[in-house]
């Protein structure tokens, strides 16, 4: 796919480009980040991939607790993880 | 926002799609609500090559006139004949709460994977088998990555085949069941049109993927993320280096919404009559919540429910003749996936059972019931509301989750507020 057709977003301030149809959860993993910190402070990442477990929660455009596995990447999205 | 449909279908997997299509093609106004970005459910998720059945149903859905509400989650039943749903903050119509009124309601909420906790299962890159498959179809690159697939059920083979086709190095498939337990199911598959295992075996043979039966993961290791998995087989243990562990122990039905509505549940599954009608008037259920039986059964039940909901009873009953084969398949699947009770020893005292609230097994052992443990340890009180740890606690401790209360999924404060407004209650 031509690079210009790929969607540009940032994860923790770092730019990346992904193919259309990529979930935010996949983009977070591509960036090398995990999703949230557990109550005990451990990094957590997606488990179920289908919106059940809530382990993939991230902040998107400043909105916290978004289930990243059920949201598609969009142009200019700013994704933050702890 | 308010909308009214003759038939409202919850869940856009095969059962929900079939129900919506059959009802809409009869001229009913149909709404199809689903919390994912696109219809198809887990099995027909976008990003994978679709088989002809999926293509056919998805294009029929598009032509049917059913209104799709993708990115919406149902969270409450304010009164009979209406549901409340919240739109994803990043879906087209953002930040809305909708009251969806219905004449007939069809619940096709599907199933989720059963996860059994073991040391290290909370490490990043330890995922469900369907979970990793979903991530990969959602754009996670897997080519060249080493993946260990483990747990139980035919999903393991389907996922391994899919990942291998995308260039993953499948380090092995660990199936907890013994060969004799799987044999009966394999025979059923050969009688079915979907020759899944045959196809899988062909591919695995050509790639030399080791398949271990009576084998399961006992620990996942890594600093910050997964690096290796220790597996156990007949008293022997060894370590397998891998980038991902795709591990699921078959499926459990998503019945929380049905419980909230008050539908009768028999042995963890929703009870229905031969027209998919539940114990509650005007409420139907189709697919995995009535019994784990795969896509063919889901399509059949969805069609019956959709036809019954619009009063086409003869057409619905005509489909009943296909049921016995589906029932045999579901029973064979159930037997094949029976869990070895040795798996109860996987979780150690310090293994977290509730991932949301970080509750270890030792804390739960002090209590006698799910309810007591919930109240005193917060197990099952986090955002997933016990959907992950509940099934684990059921297997490990014999507990059954007792009640479901609204909201059945976490929602924004505004959504709870809108509910109060519409009920005419005072709001702060």
Image (tube, rainbow, N blue to C red):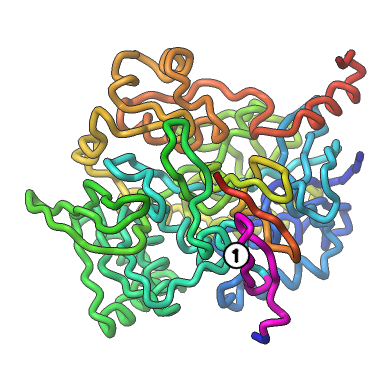
Residue at the spot of label 1 = B45
- The residue nearer to you, when weighing B3 against A14, is A14
Q: Is residue B321 visible?
A: no
Horizontal relation, residue B73 to residue B110: left or right: right
Residue drawn 42% across the image and 35% down it: B391
At a point 71% along the width and 44% down the height, the residue shown is: B106
Task: Return the x and y of residue B4 as percentages of the image width and height.
Answer: 90, 42
**Which residue is drawn at the image coordinates 21% and 62% (left, top)?**
B240
| Quadrant (top left, top right, bottom left, bottom right) of the C terminus of chain B | top right
Above or below B270: residue B58: below
Residue B140 at x, y percent in the picture:
52, 67
Identity of the residue furthest to the left in this view:
B235
Looking at the rendered image, the quarter that the N terminus of chain B falls into is top right
Q: Where is residue B264 in the image (x, y as percent from the top left)?
A: 58, 28
Q: Does residue B37 appear in this view?
A: yes
Give above or below for B205 relative to B332: below
Q: Which residue does the image show at 39% across and 16% down from the upper left?
A: B369
**Left or right of B427 in this view: B328:** left
Give the total of numbered labels.
1
Q: What stretch is highlighted in magenta?
A: A3-20
């Amino acid at each position: 796919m031509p690079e210009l057709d790929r969607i540009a977003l940032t994860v923790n301030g770092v730019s990346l480009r992904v193919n259309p149809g990529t979930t935010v959860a996949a983009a977070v993993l591509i960036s090398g980040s995990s999703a949230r910190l557990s109550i005990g402070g451990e990094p957590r990442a997606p488990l179920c991939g289908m919106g059940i477990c809530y382990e993939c929660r991230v902040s998107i455009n400043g909105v916290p607790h978004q289930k990243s596995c059920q949201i598609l990447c969009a142009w200019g999205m700013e994704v933050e993880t702890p | 926002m308010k909308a009214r449909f003759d038939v409202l279908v919850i869940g856009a997997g095969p059962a929900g799609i079939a129900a919506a299509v059959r009802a809409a093609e009869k001229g009913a106004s149909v709404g199809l609500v689903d919390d994912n970005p696109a219809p198809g459910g887990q099995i027909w998720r976008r990003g994978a090559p679709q088989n002809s059945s999926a293509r056919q149903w998805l294009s029929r859905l598009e032509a049917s006139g059913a209104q799709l509400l993708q990115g919406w989650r149902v969270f409450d039943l304010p009164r009979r004949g209406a549901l409340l749903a919240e739109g994803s903050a990043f879906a087209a119509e953002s930040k809305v709460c909708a009251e969806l009124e219905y004449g007939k309601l069809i619940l096709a909420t599907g199933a989720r994977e059963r996860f059994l906790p073991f040391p290290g299962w909370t490490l990043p890159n330890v995922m469900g088998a369907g979970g990793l498959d979903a991530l990969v179809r959602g754009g996670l690159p897997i080519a060249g990555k080493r993946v260990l697939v483990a747990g139980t059920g035919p999903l393991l083979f389907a996922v391994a085949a899919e990942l291998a086709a995308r260039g993953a190095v499948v380090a092995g498939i660990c199936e907890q069941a013994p060969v004799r337990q799987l044999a009966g199911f394999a025979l059923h598959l050969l009688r079915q049109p979907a020759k899944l295992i045959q196809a899988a075996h062909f591919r695995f043979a050509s790639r030399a993927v080791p398949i271990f039966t009576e084998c399961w993961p006992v620990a996942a290791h890594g600093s910050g993320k997964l690096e290796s998995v220790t597996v156990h087989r007949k008293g022997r243990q060894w370590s397998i280096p891998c980038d991902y562990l795709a591990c699921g122990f078959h499926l459990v039905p998503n019945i929380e919404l049905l419980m909230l509505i008050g539908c009768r549940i028999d042995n963890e599954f929703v009870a229905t009559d031969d027209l998919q009608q539940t114990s509650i008037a005007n409420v139907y259920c189709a697919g995995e919540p009535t019994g784990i039986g795969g896509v063919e059964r889901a399509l059949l039940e969805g069609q019956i429910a959709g036809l019954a909901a619009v009063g086409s009873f003869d057409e619905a009953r005509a489909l009943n003749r296909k049921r016995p084969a589906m029932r045999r398949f579901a029973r064979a699947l159930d037997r094949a996936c029976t869990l070895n009770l040795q798996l109860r020893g996987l979780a150690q005292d310090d293994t977290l059972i509730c991932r949301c609230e970080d509750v270890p097994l030792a804390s739960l052992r002090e209590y006698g019931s799910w309810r007591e443990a919930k109240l005193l340890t917060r197990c099952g009180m986090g955002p997933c509301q016990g959907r992950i740890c509940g099934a684990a606690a059921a297997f490990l401790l014999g507990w059954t989750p007792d009640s479901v209360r609204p909201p059945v999924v976490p929602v924004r404060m505004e959504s709870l507020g809108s509910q109060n407004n519409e009920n005419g209650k005072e709001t702060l």
